[in-house]
Image: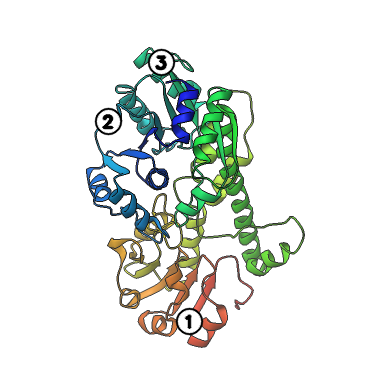
Amino acid sequence: MTLAQLEKSIKNRSANLAVIGLGYVGLPVAALFAQKGFKVTGVDIKQSRTDLINQGVSPIEGKEPGLSELIASVVDSGNLKATTDYQALRDADIIMIDVETPVNQDHIPEYHALRSAVTSLVQVLKKGALIIVESTVMPGTLEKIVLPIIEKETGYALNKDFFLGNCPERVMPGKLLRNLRTMSRVAGGGSEETARVMVSLYSIIVEADVDPADWITAEIVKTAENTYRDVQIAFANEVALISEALGADVWKVRELVRKSPGREMLFPGAGVGGHCIPKDPWLLASSVRDLDVPVRLIPAARDINTSMPAHMFALVKQHAAGLKGKKVLILGYAYLHDSDDDRNSPSAILVDFLKDVGAEPVIHDPFIKSFQGDVLEMARGCVAAVLMTAHSEYQELDLAGLVSALEDPLLIDGRNVIDPDSAIQTGLTLVRLGDTSRETD
């Protein structure tokens, strides 16, 4: 199939689509294209996940507006099918890859899942197919890793026998469908023609701009945008630490800073988690690790953000009357509010710190099955509560009930969820990250 033929099949919805990796990105992508009339085959290594999808059930928990209904609809229509068998992709014209791309303890990218997905795919890849990597990768990955695997395993020639591109996802749990529909995308193609065809494809589900580019530009854009956010969060966290030390309230500081044009200070917080921001800055930095490019700001920002759970632990030690043998309630284990996504959870780090000093963490999270329960019952006998995730449920927390349940009425708020005046009225001792303005000797 030529690019011209492929573009025609995209426009008339006759192109066979496939998505490898049916997680937070791949599944909603597959469902949206299926909704638009494409026949979509999804591949995932987890049988339990594909079984649920084929029953019309979303395996993604947490608040994801419209996703469960969409999956049920497109499965019922026959437009979306899931499998663990790559043989189902023999007739695929367009294959989108959405697998994890983590970094190791030395901050070096590990592409086991990506290599495995590409290696399995090329065993059944038909000529004329377009492969699109949606996963966020280190700049240079398509040229140095993905392309060589395809060429070696198939003997195919790029832009003749197959086409290759990358269109990095831009999604956040809790807003998956909205992000996919409304956020712009960068379509990096192995040629200008490939990029143009990718623009035609993604414009079907994306209501915002889809900008054509080359591989390296698309790779840098995605890693740079998440690195920018990480750096800005690190700035907010450092101002929070300074405010604490000087007896100020960082939340008031932030409010007043933002009144100056162009000073959009982000929220400080108890830690930065998730799959993207903790690793994407390292992907960007790793792209030049063998070149003579000094990278200083990115590691500094990562160090600040990584240290925030340790700072939360320091606040617990400072304000709780002893921890050894005592129970501490952790409010929230997911890294993001109203989500079940606990990848790189800051709470997990805090839990380890508490265990190291002989404390007993009691974890509550309304969106993670293993941590669900009556929050007040779980608080009973705890010497402190530490709010790590801004779940909406905690905004309605019964503070009077919490005071009665806790052994000591202490709550350390790492997300600015609890109203200080309400805490005072109920007798709750509230310690807020970045705020010592109300504390007295």
Residue 86: assigned label:
2
Q: Please give the label number shown on residue 428.
A: 1
In the rendering, at what x and y percent does residue 316 appear? 46, 67
State the SS at label 3: helix
Residue with the mark numbered 3: 151
Give percent across and percent down for residue 3: 49, 23
* Residue 356, image quadrant: bottom left
Between 28 and 422, which is closer to the camera in this rendering?
28
Q: Nearer the viewer, mark 1 or mark 3?
A: 3
Q: 28 or 402: which is nearer to us?
A: 28
90 to 375, vertically: above or below = above
Dot 1 amino acid type? Leu
Image spot of residue 194 (x, y percent): 53, 25
Kind of residue indicated by mark 3: Glu
First along the sequence among labels 1 and 3: 3
Three-letter code for the amino acid on which mark 2 is drawn: Tyr
Residue occupying the far bottom of the picture: 425
